[in-house]
Image (cartoon, rainbow, N blue to C red):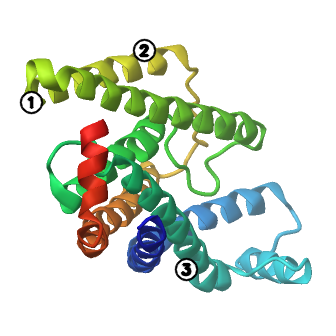
């Protein structure tokens, strides 16, 4: 059954990546273009040799000469490939987590389990790290802080995922004695307190060049979250539908897992 779930997870992940690409292409890339335009204006202001209106073409040609993809490639096939590959990987991992969790989270069925796991993953993997260290468009991040910012982001991501796993464990332990509703609320509150403590403990990084439009920054970050919302919504809802047939063929395994839960 695991192999069947893994295949379904990767397939729905590919679909999620394609849908997310459509959203990113329409709403995200215009914000990136505005950020790049600001970056080019700053570079032109600092370079006396830069001709008016010619800086973008010079940079594009230089990128192509160095073997780097041009802006059109980055915003098109490059972005699509990245999101599809990412979606397939996330879908595959999600299927493995579902295979472990199915039957251990109560009698909520394949769709309910998939939706619950997707929501938990979205909160712990996306929302918690991004609220502390939000995504930045080009021209906003300072080169000197990119390394430490990336490191802190992934540290927070790992801590958040571990905290969410601990919250699920706590909820399962409290379920029999206090009921599902109270157990869930207690575990959620414990997770929020845990995240708040981690937020206070980890350093903040605030950087924004003078003159950069706050509207562009805000829109870019909203679109970044929106891409993940679409990705996880498609995976969580779509995989639940696809997984029903697989677990239906092996429902005995689900009951056995529940008996050991």
What residue is shown at x 15% (from left), y 51% (from top)?
108
Of mark 1 and mark 3, the one earlier in the sequence is 3
Decide which of 31, 47 is in the foreground and name it. 31
Decide which of 103, 135 is in the foreground and name it. 103
- SS of the residue at dot 1? helix
- SS of the residue at dot 3? helix
Q: Quadrant of residue 138?
A: bottom right
Q: Is 16 placed left or right of 251 in the picture?
A: right
Q: Nearer the viewer, mark 1 or mark 2?
A: 1
Q: Which residue is mark 2?
A: 197
Give the alpha-carbon distance from disc 1 to disc 2, as whole Å.
Answer: 25 Å
What is the quadrant of the N terminus in the image? bottom left
Q: Is 237 placed left or right of 28 in the picture?
A: left
Rate crowding at label 1 as few (under 14), some (14 to 19) or many (20 or more) other CA atoms within 10 Å. Answer: few
- SS of the residue at dot 2? helix
What residue is shown at x 30% (from left), y 52% (from top)?
102
Are the residues tagged 3 and 2 within 8 Å (C-beta)? Answer: no
Q: Which residue is mark 1?
A: 181
What residue is shown at x 35% (from left), y 66% (from top)?
235
């Amino acid at each position: 059954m695991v192999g069947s779930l893994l295949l379904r997870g990767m397939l729905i992940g590919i679909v999620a990546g394609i849908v997310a690409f459509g959203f990113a292409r329409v709403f995200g890339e215009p914000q990136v273009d505005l950020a790049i335009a600001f970056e080019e204006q700053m570079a032109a202001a600092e370079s006396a040799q830069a001709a008016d209106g010619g800086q973008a073409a010079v940079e594009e040609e230089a990128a192509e000469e160095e073997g780097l993809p041009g802006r059109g490639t980055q915003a098109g096939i490059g972005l699509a490939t990245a999101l599809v590959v990412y979606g397939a990987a996330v879908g595959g991992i999600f299927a493995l987590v579902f295979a472990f969790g199915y039957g251990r989270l109560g009698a909520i069925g394949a769709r309910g389990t998939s939706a619950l796991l997707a929501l938990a993953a979205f909160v712990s993997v996306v929302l918690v790290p991004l609220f502390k260290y939000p995504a930045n468009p080009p021209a906003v991040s300072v080169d000197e802080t990119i390394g430490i910012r990336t490191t802190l982001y992934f540290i927070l991501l790992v801590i958040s995922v571990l905290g969410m796993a601990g919250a699920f464990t706590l909820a399962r332990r409290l379920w029999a004695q206090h009921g599902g509703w109270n157990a869930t609320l207690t575990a959620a509150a414990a997770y929020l307190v845990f995240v708040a403590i981690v937020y206070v403990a980890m350093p903040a990084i605030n950087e924004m060049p003078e003159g950069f439009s706050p509207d562009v920054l805000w829109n870019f970050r909203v679109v970044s979250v929106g891409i993940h919302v679409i990705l996880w919504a498609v995976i969580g809802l779509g995989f639940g539908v696809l997984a029903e047939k697989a677990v239906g063929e092996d429902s005995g395994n689900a009951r056995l897992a529940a008996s050991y839960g």
